[in-house]
Image: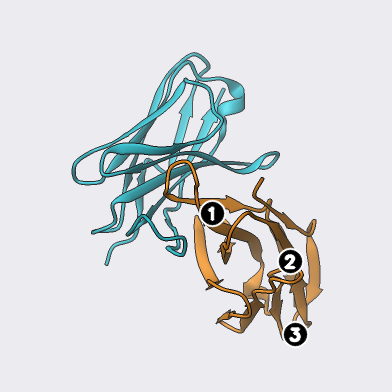
Chain colours: A cyan, B orange
Amino acid sequence: KAGVTQTPRYLIKTRGQQVTLSCSPISGHRSVSWYQQTPGQGLQFLFEYFSETQRNKGNFPGRFSGRQFSNSRSEMNVSTLELGDSALYLCASSPTQGTNNSPLHFGNGTRLTVT
Amino acid sequence: GNSVTQMEGPVTLSEEAFLTINCTYTATGYPSLFWYVQYPGEGLQLLLKATKADDKGSNKGFEATYRKETTSFHLEKGSVQVSDSAVYFCALSLIDGNTGFQKLVFGTGTRLLVSP
């Protein structure tokens, strides 16, 4: 079974631009979550989608948005990029909702650098 | 609120040394507990989990026991290898009372460095 696939692996953008990151979950997984990882803040939860609906949202400004498609693939978008948005963006999928013991399966992330 | 506290790193050990990485949690309700590991340049991988009090999760020589009385889930390994060098994250999972869906809370991570 293929794992979680994130594209692209690396991205360099300039301040003010926007960016779209893509995530393909493990086949059959319907829940997709996004995290931002930085050396200073650690892992921070962005949002979670299940069956095309946003179920949970972290404390990020409205510049960060996401969506999920009917095939469970997900995208996240960051508009008006700032230097502080430089981070590793991780996507994770899980098969179910409604239980508290489904582990997340992470992709290798997209490394975004804003200059 | 719900939170996870891990010991500060880095933890520096020689090969074959005993490893303990402390993790304590605060949670309302009955969480499941996880340890994830992140190798350089990769995402997080599930290392082990425990879903109820006194459960012991184990994998690849690593163990952790869900201690409800001390709200802890310390990670241990009897003899570390250079290949165990990575960042280790403790996490708890609960059903969010507002949404009814699973919510994970991660600790800040502990970097382990093992030298030959």
Chain bearing mark 3: B
The three-letter amino acid code for the residue at tag 3 is Glu
Instruction: Check disc 1 and report the residue beneath it.
Output: B41
Element carrying mark 1: loop
Question: Which is more N-terminal, label 1 or label 2?
Answer: 1
Q: Quadrant of the N terminus of chain A?
A: bottom left
Residue A59 appears left or right of A21: right
The three-letter amino acid code for the residue at tag 1 is Gly
Q: Nearer the viewer, residue A73 or A56?
A: A56
Q: Is residue A11 above or below residue B45?
A: above
Q: Quadrant of the C terminus of chain A?
A: top right
Which mark identifies residue B20?
none
* x and y, in percent, of residue B79 in the image: 72, 85
**View extreme (left): residue:** A70
Instruction: Check disc 2 and report the residue beneath it.
Output: B113
Q: Residue at x 75, y 80 (%)?
A: B15
Question: Which is more N-terminal, label 3 or label 2?
Answer: 3
The three-letter amino acid code for the residue at tag 2 is Leu
* Mark 3 neighbour class, 10 Å CA radius: few under 14, some 14 to 19, many 20 or more: some
Chain bearing mark 2: B
Please check whether the numbered discs 2 and 3 fall on a single chain: yes
Which mark identifies residue B16?
3
